[in-house]
Image (cartoon, rainbow, N blue to C red):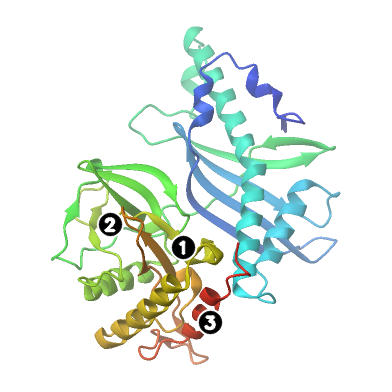
Amino acid sequence: MARTIGSGGYDFLHTVPIDHSQLDMDIRPLTSELFTFESSSPPRGSNYALHELCEYGSMRYHVLITCNDGTASCVEKTLLLRCKASMSHDMDAGDRTDAVRKAWRDLEHFWHPVVKADYLSRIQHMAQEAAVPSPFAARSSQFPPRGQGKPLVRLQVVTMDGTLATKEHAETLKWPRYDPLPNAWPGLAVFDPTLVTLGQLVHGRLGNLAFVGGSRCFFKSLQGFLDAQYFIRLADNLIKLQGSPLFPVLVGLVESEGGDGRIEGILWEYIEGDYLDRTDMATKDQATREKWKRQIAEAAEITRSVGVAWSNARVSDIFIKRDVDGTENVVVWGLGCGVLHTTRAGETLKPEIGAVQGLEGIRDYIDDIKGHH
């Protein structure tokens, strides 16, 4: 049975008699999966579905948004198709990055208010049950006691008869995506997860702002990587690159909540700044841009000399660190080690170590002071 949220502005949110400051909480993303599947029933063809696992307040949500060619035109179908199209390789890298970012932001603007409305409705219902004890309350497993983990809400967002509604779905999504890893880096500091306080997601790619013993760091969970092997290679590479200001400072590792010494995340230094592909070149003088190009070339030589794969350099690999005095320098955050190549024979090959490809494209990007605002 579908539950109508309502159309036009979610007026419902302003009628719930509880603390509305909860609306200011951040939705914490855990994992997103955009699936393409072939319909088994007419009309046949490719359909799309977004599975979004996130945490909001005291609950965990598995949001499902589907795109089915058999349905009438609806906003979720339009948004999913736009998201899929934004990943096309028919446009240049900069345009594709902007298109992907905008498509995902539009999708978030679509489902974020729905999750918040649903959350407030459930909290209100729980408050009413607590005020008026029900003989049936013990039968409900929707909200398990504290200490048994956050309750999981499976919420499908769907347009029905022209109205945005939600209903429960039966789909599953593996979480955690990967089991915690054995600690293969005995020389690194390991932090108890209870000592790491997570803040907001930062720049999308770096992970979350984290506070450790009063100091700021960046934290990225193992679950936020493309695969567990990427996490392993990144940790190995950062160890080799320690000591150079052109690469992130590795602060340490974060232990899993199991307390068995296995690793669940990575901590690196906090720095101010932004990625190169979000930097307006027209605001930078020629001396600064020439310095950045020299630093990127130096970073490429360092990776080659210590045996770190940075085989395909991209603008999105480069972070511009902003010091207190306003000085801006390059930090190479992406190391091109996220993809393993598989041959037709089924062999898995590590990224090739050697001359870095793509540097000319980065230099051209920095010199194009009219094209990036």
Which percent across, then down, holds residue 313?
Answer: 46, 79
Disc 2 on helix, strand or loop? Answer: strand
Which percent across, then down, holds residue 63?
Answer: 59, 44
Q: CA distance from mark 3 to mark 1?
A: 16 Å
> On the picture, is 325 further left or further right than 25?
left
Front residue of 95/26: it is: 95
Above or below for 310 versus 273: below
> On the picture, is 208 further left or further right than 54?
left
Above or below for 11 versus 36: above
**Residue occupied by mark 3:** 361
Residue occupying image coordinates x 26% and y 58%: 263
Q: CA distance from mark 2 to mark 3?
A: 28 Å
In the orientation shown, which residue stands out farthest toward the top? 132
Q: CA distance from mark 2 to mark 1?
A: 15 Å
The N terminus - image quarter: top right
Which percent across, then down, holds residue 365?
Answer: 55, 75
**Residue 169 disc label:** none
Name the amino acid, label 1: Tyr
**Residue occupied by mark 1:** 275
Which percent across, then down, holds residue 213?
Answer: 20, 42
Name the amino acid, label 3: Gly
Front residue of 255/362: it is: 362
